[in-house]
Amino acid sequence: MSHIDNVIIQVRARLQLLGIKLWEEPYYFSDIGGIESEIDRLAKDFSTNLSLSISNCKLALTELQDGALRKLAARKEFNETGLATFSVRRINNQEGTQNMLEVKCDLNALGKELQSRIAEKLQLNDPNRVKCISAGKIIDPDRTLNGQGLKNNQQLMVIISEIDRDETNSKEAMYDRIRKIKMDVEAIVDSERQLFEMEDQDGNPVFLPPNENRALLMAMGFCEKARAAIKRQHYDEALILLLEADEKFTTCNSGFLESVDNYALVNLDIVWCYLCLKNVTQLPDAQRRLDICEQSFRRSYGENMNRLITLKGNACPERALLMRLHLLQGVVLFHQNRRDEAYERLEIAGRELRELKVDDSAVEALVEMGYEPFEARLGLRACSGNLEQAINFIHDRREKKRDARERSHKERKVNSKLTRKNSDKDWVNPRSVCTLMEMGFSHDLVVAALKECNNDLQRALDLLQTRSDELLKNLPKKETADTDLLEQLKQLGFNEDMTRVALETTSNDMEKALDFLVKIFGNEEELVKQMERISEAAKIATGGDDTPSTSSGIGSLVNTALGKVKNEMESLKAYERFNEDITSNEQDYLDLPLLQEEQILAEYKRFLEQ
């Protein structure tokens, strides 16, 4: 941020305090224009009151007057013609704000029309390279501007997809990468390939209904790719992915969002990207997101993290997140000219930052002992730099995670089985299934009881204790594998035992049985071998022709099976692409380097002291 920006913030606040309107007399006359002598007088007065130079005050007043007059002209034009004016700020990683421009568009037009007008102004051939952001939302090209809440005189943030000419491995435009990331995440989630296992902070699994689970998995997939982009300092790309994740999170009504910090972190990361892109047009959205983050942290961690501190003592690496929140709150307060509050918040962030700083030589010492660098940093931060305590902390944390995962192994297994069989309306909580099975009830009876009681554990237990005979009588009879279907699938080279299980599990539904079978293969090599077996079976069935006849009994099945195997291969490749730049460190989001935070803290404290 420049020095003049700091001056403008203070001058604007004083104008508002005194109720001075620079577009009215005596500062402006419609038939004459701006009155320089009045602006000079005001600049001298403001210079005395704000302890700023007269020249800087005059520059700020002139700029604010010009901005106000432009808005008045835009309002008049809108009332007369219905044409809205947007103040567009184009940003990029290198410069923050690259340039600013005014664009006019009808509010009844689609988002793509606004994209086209911005592209025309910027002399871009492809409007699809333009991504518009308004109030923290990506503008949908296929919906009207009015329908998305856009107003006349609104400020927009625009990111332009550039070609990565400096990267030797890729000439892709950013939006091509983002489009592929979205397609890959969707393919992985829909293939039921394990993208993430959702856990609480102690490693216990979190289970959700299938549709809700899908939305959350996609959101978390976008978040992971965004964090990888942040590490490369590609804040524009990260911001787009985070806003896509935000869209997915907000479609979810689950109390899950209130019990974990995932949604809080998305909002925190979005505001971090705003700051790194030096963008203040989204200031109201930044305030809203930091409020969401603070409320979420309170629910997850307790007031001032007291719940976490009660459980873990001061050894909670999550303090780094609280420090970043306080820093960003200080920055937002500064831009709102709430300078005393900003100073207090930055002081808190500074104190927390000093407590989180660790000695590089201590990190190196732990790494030499065989610990991962992130474990070393988190351990030392949690233990105030004490090497011995950090080692104990790392071991305790590893042990708690391992114990939680061992305890929940049965629940995860049940969840995997139930996910394949149940839709949202039939979903039952795997943890409840395991609890009731441990009391001696059979799996099928437990599932039936929980379905009837909408996952109310106590009601399901009462039902099992009082009406188990009725439940048993209503259970669907288990089907054995159909011999004809079994034979057809064996002909395609599928293992007989697994084929039998697939048919029994899916009640002899051939389509679902094929889905079941292709998901058994764990790598591309196994899938290629299965494709070869299917193709060989097809040749035998059709007398050696390369292409199976669709009129033959097995021909249609061959085509279906090959299609499913190919889809599974695509999802596997998508999974591999997704993981190319993703760390295996599940606590990576807590391992903040803190270098940028230190620089930002120093910069804003300097502005406050000027």
Image (cartoon, rainbow, N blue to C red):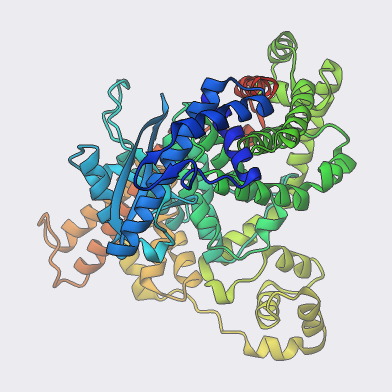
Is 268 in front, or is 177? Answer: 268
Residue 458, image x, y percentages: 81, 76
Q: Give the answer, above or below, for where 10 lies relative to 68.
A: above
Q: Position of residue 113 (x, y in %)?
A: 25, 55
Q: Residue 235: in sight, yes or no?
A: no
Which residue is found at the position 75% from the left and 86% from the top? 468
Vertical comparison of 564 with 396: above or below: below
Q: Is residue 293 above or below residue 397?
A: below
- The answer to whether residue 84 of the structure is visible from this angle is yes
Depth check, front residue: 382 or 439: 382
Answer with left or right where residue 76 lies relative to residue 260: left
Residue 82 image position (x, y, % from top left) = 30, 63
- Of residues 262 and 82, which is closer to you in this image? 82
Q: Is residue 373 above or below residue 411?
A: above
- Work out which residue is located at the far top of the displayed protein and give it: 361
Left or right of 253 in this view: 211: left
Coordinates of residue 529 in the picture (x, y in percent): 31, 45
Q: Which of the 4 image quadrants contains residue 592?
A: top right
* Quarter occupied by the C terminus: top right
Q: Is residue 95 left or right of residue 309?
A: left
